[in-house]
Image (cartoon, rainbow, N blue to C red):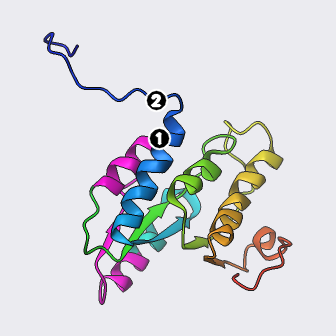
Amino acid sequence: KDEIGKFVPQIVVDDSFNACVKICNFIRMKFNTKVICIEEKNREHILRDMVYDFLSIGFNVHKNLDKIDNRINIVNTIQQMKKNHNYYIQNMYGAYDNYIEKNAEMLSPNYSLLLSIDNKYPKYYSSEEKYLEDKFSLIHKTLDNGGIVIINIDDERLKNYNIDDNNI
């Protein structure tokens, strides 16, 4: 029941993350919208806004709301997509172990842009190694989808990341 005592329809699932993945993929495939995931330093949204402005010249582009990259808000933003959206841009940030990886699994990115790897990893990661694994998971999830990854080779850790693929 809701706060005034009315019965509210509910969908009960065993795994909420898996349900979110299925919802996002269903909507994306229904509209055939390409997903661009952008990982940029300090949640500045500079690159996201530049890519949005550039693509908006010739395409219909939908982007995530400012500073919102959690699972529920990603699903809500994707549900706002329209049939005429050619691209959906989502910022990706690390918060704790496997955070980026799980969000990338939900989004199935066609393109990913990685700007930098912070020298100081966020405090909610269990280790620097887990932080790096999570950052690099965006590369792997994109390539697993047959997508294209663009990295900033001015960042030493991105430049030296060893992956053998022609789509980087």
The image shows residue 27 at horizontal and vertical percentages of 36, 59
Any part of residue 166 in sight = yes
Residue 104 versus residue 134: which sits nearer the camera?
A: 104
Q: Amino acid at mark 1?
A: Ala
Q: Quadrant of residue 61?
A: bottom left
Residue bounds of the magenta highlight: 50-79
- Contact flag, marks 1 and 2 (Cβ < 8 Å): yes
Q: Quadrant of the C terminus?
A: bottom right
x 58%, y 71%: residue: 112
Q: Amino acid at mark 2?
A: Val
Residue 56: say if magenta: yes
Task: Say whether residue 108 is left or right of residue 75.
Answer: right
The image shows residue 117 at horizontal and vertical percentages of 70, 62
x 13%, y 12%: residue: 4
The residue tagged 1 is 19
Determine the secondary structure under disc 1. Answer: helix
x 49%, y 34%: residue: 16
Residue 103: say if magenta: no
The image shows residue 142 at horizontal and vertical percentages of 63, 68
Q: Disc number at residue 155?
A: none
x 61%, y 52%: residue: 100
Among the two numbered marks 1 and 2 on one chain, the one whose residue lies closer to the N terminus: 2
| Farthest bottom residue in view | 58
The residue tagged 2 is 13
